[in-house]
Image: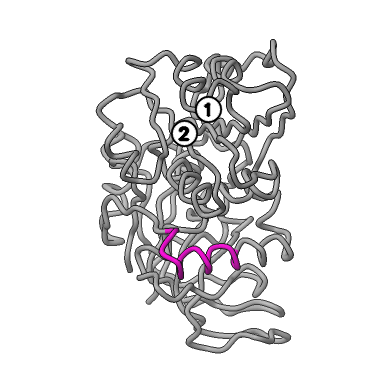
Amino acid sequence: MPRVVVFDEFGGPKVMHIVEESTPEPGVGEVRVRIEAFAVNPLDLMMRSGTSPAPIPLPHARLGVEGTGVIDEIGPGVTGLEIGDPVIITAIPDASARGSYADYTTLPASRVIARPTGLDVTQAAAIWVAYSTAYGALIEKAGMRPGDHVLISAASGGVGRAAMQIANQIGAVPIAVTRQTAKKDDLLAAGAAAVIATDHDDLVEAVRDHTGGTGADLILDLVMGPGQQDLVNTARPGATLVVAGSLDPRPTPFPTGIPLRIFRYRSFDHTLDPAAVGRMAAFLNAGVRLGALSPAIDTVFALDDIVEAHRHLEEGLHTGGKIVVTL
């Protein structure tokens, strides 16, 4: 019988266990996807531990907001899709009930897109959350343009790496920020035009050097917390700050000193909008075809090793690429 990862209480990775359930049937306007692989995301850890901003009903909660597979069954009223089509899942708003940590899931047909030719299964499992978040924040929300100097915090993470590739794809100039000098070479190889390591470099001075003295045009803050003001201090007057992450749990004072356009971005701002998803899909397809977009993979686990996969992410054992589980 099909396998599903569930948890009945909040806690560490060991609260997850695999059960067998009957194969779900798609409803009107839905498809059933046979999952081939899914990525492990920080939101999954938050849901499992009970720290998710959205309530998670227990027991028998599921996990997983991204994945790839093939259409296995088509519900009434669905057009434009065929059984056997390889797809990427773009959104699972009710992940606690129909998450992708399973052999099968059902979801609205509008929540899948064709899998780009040129991606293998592990890459396809890892591309959507990071790249749609970076694209949505930088292009849909902030209006990034060719020539913009884009300062990217937490650049070694999945969204940060995606943001560098997307900036390069449209002709912007990605400037990566990391806390560790040891990561400089890796980030340059990943697409950064320049890397600023805050354990060695003065952030404001370094940004001025890399922008000819004008300052950053756009700041992508994936961290928040008190350090956000340091990022803001690098900006030119009238620059844009877009906040798309919250890795630092400490309070974030409102930025001062420089006039800015400020946006807060959440992935569901656009992943539930069919028109925006269409634009994202076209951009990703073009980037993959041109070789400009390629998700980094850290480690691939089997479903039976889901506890170890969560521990790998939770303990920071990954190197910046995505953790993928194959079925």
Q: Does the magenta stretch include residue 227?
A: no
Asked whether residue 217 is in view, the answer is: yes
Disc number for residue 110 = none
Relative to 91, is 300 on the left or the right?
left
Magenta range is: 281-293
The residue that label 1 is drawn on is 211
Query: Viewer-proximal residue, 249 or 46?
Result: 249
Instruction: Give the amino acid type for the residue marked by disc 2 in the picture.
Output: Ile
Above or below, 314 against 260 in this view is below
Question: Considering the numbered disc 2 on the image, is that residue within a helix, a strand or a loop?
Answer: strand
Q: For mark 2, does the 10 Å Cα neighbourhood hold few (<14), some (14 to 19), or many (20 or more) residues?
A: many
Residue 117 location in percent, x, y? 44, 76
Residue 266 location in percent, x, y? 65, 42
**Residue appearing at x 52%, y 88% in the figure:** 83
| In this rendering, the label closer to the viewer, 2 or 1 | 1
Q: Is residue 292 magenta?
A: yes
Query: Viewer-proximal residue, 287 or 244?
Result: 287
Query: Viewer-proximal residue, 175 or 313?
Result: 175
- Contact check, label 2 and label 1, Cβ < 8 Å: yes
Asked whether residue 311 is in view, the answer is: no
Above or below, 93 against 289 in this view is above
Residue 86 location in percent, x, y? 47, 79
Question: The N terminus appears in which quarter of the rendering?
Answer: bottom left
Query: Viewer-proximal residue, 31 or 201?
Result: 201
Q: For mark 1, does the 10 Å Cα neighbourhood hold few (<14), some (14 to 19), or many (20 or more) residues?
A: some
Considering only order in the chain, which callout, 1 or 2, is on the residue closer to the N terminus? 2
Question: The C terminus appears in which quarter of the rendering?
Answer: bottom left
Name the residue at the top extreme.
Answer: 257
The residue that label 2 is drawn on is 175
Question: Considering the numbered disc 1 on the image, is that residue within a helix, a strand or a loop?
Answer: loop
